[in-house]
Image (spheres, rainbow, N blue to C red):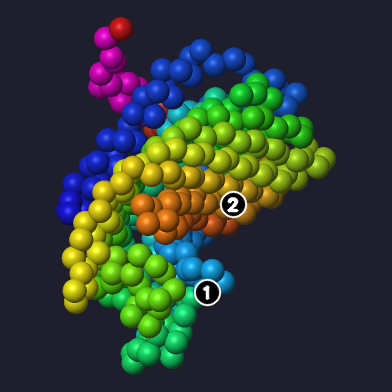
Amino acid sequence: MFSKHNLIILFVALLSKPVLLAQSTSRSQRALDTMFVRDFSNRPTVRAYLSNKFNSLTLRADGSLTDLRYEPNGHFNIGFGASYKRLTLNIGFPIPFIPSDVEERGRTRFLDAQATLHTNKQSSNLFLQVFKGYHIISHDLQQLGWSQTTRYPYRADLSQFNIGLSTLRVADDEHFSYRATFNQDAWQQRTKGSWLYGGYATCYVLRSDSSVIPTALEDGFGDAYGLTRGLLIDLGPMGGYAHTFVHRKHWFLTLSAAVGAGLGFQRVDRSGVDLHETRSHIGPGWHTQFRAGSGYNSRYYYAGVLFNQERVAYLTEGQERYGWTVGNFRVMVAMRLKERPEQVDRGLRWLKKRTVLPVP
């Protein structure tokens, strides 16, 4: 597996392409209808937030039996950020005074990077996650016949890596703004919605020393028992709809949902006492995305609660159903500065001089 350093470089490389596209296409964007949307991207926006990122993986059980669900030990962050023109930067830190629950859920080591890119016309979500150490929330120790000191059944050997991108084009970018809710540098003043269309691509890797399915549950998961490694890659088109409801110009509720389906490559290793096999398969996969935000927005101030979730699922060669989820929840406050600090313009001029423009 790649080192964390290489993974970060890969993520930044993927991130840079949508940014360049956003810069090149923004010149051709139609003007916003100011009766519906006010654009404040020409003024610095500063923000503070509390955030909880989450991740889970689920294997579907046969019939009416309980599905098997793993989660890492979650973490809460406090963060600060700023936006100016097309540049947005957020930095988060673990909240120090929240007590650790390692004794209940076990320890999780992780690398977690999630980013959203919003322009008038495009909304993109990128994520890169590496987690090792999961606990089971669907079954207890007694059901599995395990003897551990943690409250939840814990698998220190279970690790997963995922990287992905989903991007959606906003059809009515003159009257509807994703940025108003999710990037805080615009203001949606009237109720409006828009159809969305785009696509997604994901890569998921799962590893464990022994079967992901505990021995006590092997009869309820068919051919999934013995699964120790998996590689799942898929891509496809997706589409959906987003709508912002506005009350008295300031109070808002934004709901957005999109669904996609495509084909993917699946490689699965199964190991056991008398079992060792590798299966490769081209099979169907699907992708769902849900975003929501609610709060207060005005010329200078923003306060809101935001939710973002991406779910990917697969149907394997043996008809087993497998899925994983990634997302975050944020409480956000932001303020738009009345004047641009001189240092900001000076820094942008310096950056512009050193930016290599592509040859047409």
Secondary structure of residue under mark 1:
loop
Q: Which mark is residue 65?
A: 1
| Residue 124: percent from left, percent from top | 47, 36
Point out the stretch of residues depicted in magenta.
Answer: 346-359
Mark 2: few, some, or many residues within 10 Å (few <14, many ≥20)? some
Residue located beneath label 2 in the image: 306
Q: Residue furthest top?
A: 360
Q: Report the amino acid beneath label 2.
A: Leu
Residue 155 vs 20, above or below: the answer is below
Residue 105 vs 87, above or below: the answer is below
Q: Report the amino acid beneath label 1.
A: Leu
Do we see residue 357 in this rendering?
Answer: yes
| Residue 255: percent from left, percent from top | 66, 44
Question: Which is nearer the eye, 183 or 316?
Answer: 316
Do we see residue 346 in this rendering?
Answer: no
- Pick whichever of labels 2 and 1 is earlier in the sequence: 1
